[in-house]
Amino acid sequence: MDKMNHSSAEAEAETIEPLRYLSKGEAAAIETELLRDYRFGQQQLIEIWGQACALAITKAYPLGSLTKKQPTVLVICGPDQNGSIGLVCARHLRMFEYEPTIYHPKRSSHSLHQDFTVQCEKMDIPFLSYLPTEVQLINDAYNLVIDAMLGPEADCANIKEPYSGILVTLKQIKIPIASVDVPSGWDVEERSQDGINPEVLISLTAPKKCATSFTGKHFLAGRFLPYDIQKKYELNLPDFPGTDCLIEL
Amino acid sequence: VPFPPSSGIPGTQILVICGPDQNGSIGLVCARHLRMFEYEPTIYHPKRSSHSLHQDFTVQCEKMDIPFLSYLPTEVQLINDAYNLVIDAMLGPEADCANIKEPYSGILVTLKQIKIPIASVDVPSGWDVEERSQDGINPEVLISLTAPKKCATSFTGKHFLAGRFLPYDIQKKYELNLPDFPGTDCLIEL
């Protein structure tokens, strides 16, 4: 069978098919297949994604490059899978000696989400009870914000509180935003005119259509997708360097 | 991964022998990731746990087109010729090393005769967790998970500590004194 990952030495000799940007339906279909047919567990996938996100953050914002006295990072977690990925990302950043603080206003009752929350609490990661509306407080306290609020499954036309309010705040902050998978508030398939403007986007598994108009630093994170799925959806994923689980696009 | 692909030759053949319990599951996941890193693992998994998590890991490997052997040749030269190394993911620290049943006892006999290197996951299968067995297998590489076990004090090969997730409170409580992992690596050579 043809391997999907060709060695880079042969890259010039072949036509490189373009990287596929997924629609909302395709992203959902791939995830369903991974869980149903490939028997990946949700906890397993979230851990893989969260860890890869943390590694992307360390590449985009190495410890030595942070300007504040402490390597503080604000991680804003939504109620669903995107939020769980944010929790795992925060935990790994803590292992990498960053100082994450989590703002997690609405906690899902889903037991997996609660487990991830406990894992963070037991790592002494502080949880904010409210997000200051005074943006200068956020600018002063943190080096960057990780946006793990809304994922590709969210309905961007119908964003409820507290996320609509948080997005207003995020549009005003001066520190960089790194978004997990899709910038919260953006339509999965096209950029929103007045959405937040992250400096970094960490696409999980494969980029989504809205990322075609993303102009910041774009990472593809998560190196576990079975070759059969890659072929089936013609993802044309790039070669990851060495044993890295992420690549800058 | 202690063995990088040799000189960029695509496809380094690795035999991954998986036991029925957690150590075996870890072997399955290891094999899957090795496949993503473009190695060519083959799995020998004689006794499959009925535990649904273990079965999920098995399906994940099957769907990655990783071959599963239906039997392990007793002719060791066949193993020496077909594979570059063996990953021993049979028995973990919870196993009763005084009471090793078939097929693992037989596999261990074979492993003592092969010429290619063995890399053991967490504890060398057949070793007592707390002290090295006199006539146990002799792996070239040991990959301790989370923290090394007592038997590793007498291990003389290449020793890795793998897994960087242990909450600081647990590290403190058990006085693990784990070394500093380099950069964002999740493993360190001890």
Image (spheres, coloured by chain):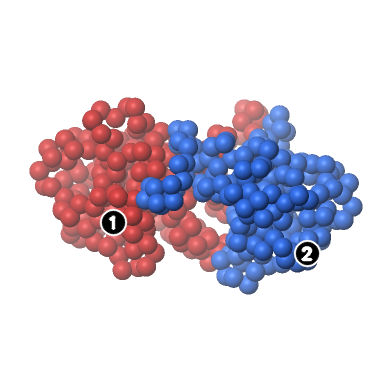
Chain colours: A red, B blue
Q: Looking at the image, can residue A52 be seen?
A: yes
- The correct choice, above or below, for B34 with respect to A143 in the image is below
Q: x, y (%) of residue B150?
A: 59, 49
Badge 2: chain ID:
B
Secondary structure found at label 1: loop
Q: Which residue is nearer to you in this view: B85 or A184?
A: B85
Q: Comparing marks 1 and 2, which lies closer to the viewer? A: 2
Point 57% across, 70% down: residue:
B52
Disc 1 marks a residue whose amino acid type is Gly
- Left or right: A30 as drawn, with respect to B142: left
Residue A78: give its label. Answer: 1
**Labelled disc at residue A55:** none
Q: Does residue A239 appear anywhere in the picture?
A: no
Image x and y of residue B87, in percent: 70, 48
Q: Residue at x 37, y 62 (%)?
A: A115
Residue name at image x 76 percent, y 61 percent:
B104
Dot 2 crowding, Cα within 10 Å, few <14, some 14–19, many 20+: few
Q: Quadrant of the N terminus of chain B?
A: top right
Q: Which residue is mark 2?
A: B103
Outermost left residue? A134
Measure how far apart labels 1 and 2 are at the Cα level.
49 Å
> In this view of the protein, which residue sits in the foreground, A204 or A125?
A125
Image coordinates of residue A188 in percent, x first then y, are: 35, 52
Question: Crowding near pointer 1: few (<14 within 10 Å), some, many (20+)?
Answer: many
Chain under label 1?
A
- Classify residue A121 by image quadrant: bottom left
Where residue A95 appears, as percent x and y from the top left, is: 39, 43
SS of the residue under disc 2: loop
Q: Amino acid at mark 2?
A: Pro
Does B181 appear above or below B131? Answer: above
Residue at the far bottom: name it.
B50
Q: In the figure, is residue B127 to the left or right of A159? A: right
